[in-house]
Amino acid sequence: MGCCYSSDNDNTDQRPEEYKPLIPHPNPVSKPPNGSDWVTPSVPSARTDEQALLTSILTKTAQNIIDVAAAESLLMEPHEYMDKARQYSTKLAVLSNSLPQKKALALPSLTSQPHQVLASDLVPYSDVQQVSKIAAYAYSAISQIKVDAKEELVVQFAIP
Amino acid sequence: MTTAALTAGLERIPDQLGYLVISEDGVLASAGELENDEHTAGVMMQMVRTACRFRLPGSADPWFKRMSVILEDFAYTVTVSGQKVFVVKRHNNQHEPINV
């Protein structure tokens, strides 16, 4: 009767964030407009547990089904549509601001006179040699770091 | 600044063997031994990006004006100004060997 499953249940359970609507529906558990004929009017009132169970099943089913016949009658007015579009774009703008920047960070400006900086004398040979020596010492020191095993790492507690 | 104005100063650098002007989008100008040297441009861009990431504690700005890549016979001097990377290949006349 023009009904179909609105979404795959497994996906909804695994990644709820992705399926969560950006703007929550004003009344999410409302019954479909012409869904009243699903409820049998002669439910015995004695078993409240049963009724609660039935209601929960009904709610669940109503959430998982798109009633195409009912949806057709819910055509949006142009101004409503515009409102919604605006709401979505505001919400998206807020969210996109909080996203991490994917593009590499812009290069900082190191100088305002590149020609002078590039034309100045090269780094003196002695400075280069000193830096090379320090780097070599540091490399050698790091490569000599080792674990000196003195005693057992795992010991047995003497349990009487 | 036009490209000609950018490169005019680079031509006058003493002992220069060639130069590159690189932007985020690619090589803007090149000359001498570095003419159309996209490979060197890519390597220098990566090196200067890496160097710019190092920050001294308590300071937000990079603490250097120029990066020097010193080899036996020549050296690359690199700086960044106005979102452009300038690379100049210069003759290195300090001929003593570097002992490591």
Image: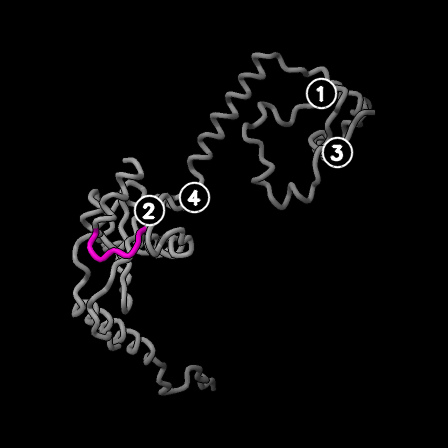
Q: Are marks 2 and 1 in contact (CB under 8 Å)?
A: no
- Residue indicated by mark 2: B21
Nearest to viewer (mark 2 / mark 3):
2
Mark 2 lies on a secondary structure that is strand
> For the residues marked 1 and 3, what is the alpha-carbon distance in whole angstroms?
14 Å
| x and y, in percent, of residue A149 in the image | 37, 86
- Same chain, labels 2 and 1: no
Q: Is residue A48 visible?
A: no
The residue shown at (47%, 84%) is A159
| x and y, in percent, of residue A43 in the image | 80, 26
- Residue indicated by mark 3: A5
> For the residues marked 4 and 2, what is the alpha-carbon distance in whole angstroms?
21 Å
- Residue indicated by mark 4: A103
- Same chain, labels 4 and 2: no
- Residue indicated by mark 1: A71
Q: Is residue A3 visible?
A: yes
Q: Are marks 2 and 3 in contact (CB under 8 Å)?
A: no
Badge 4 amino acid: Lys
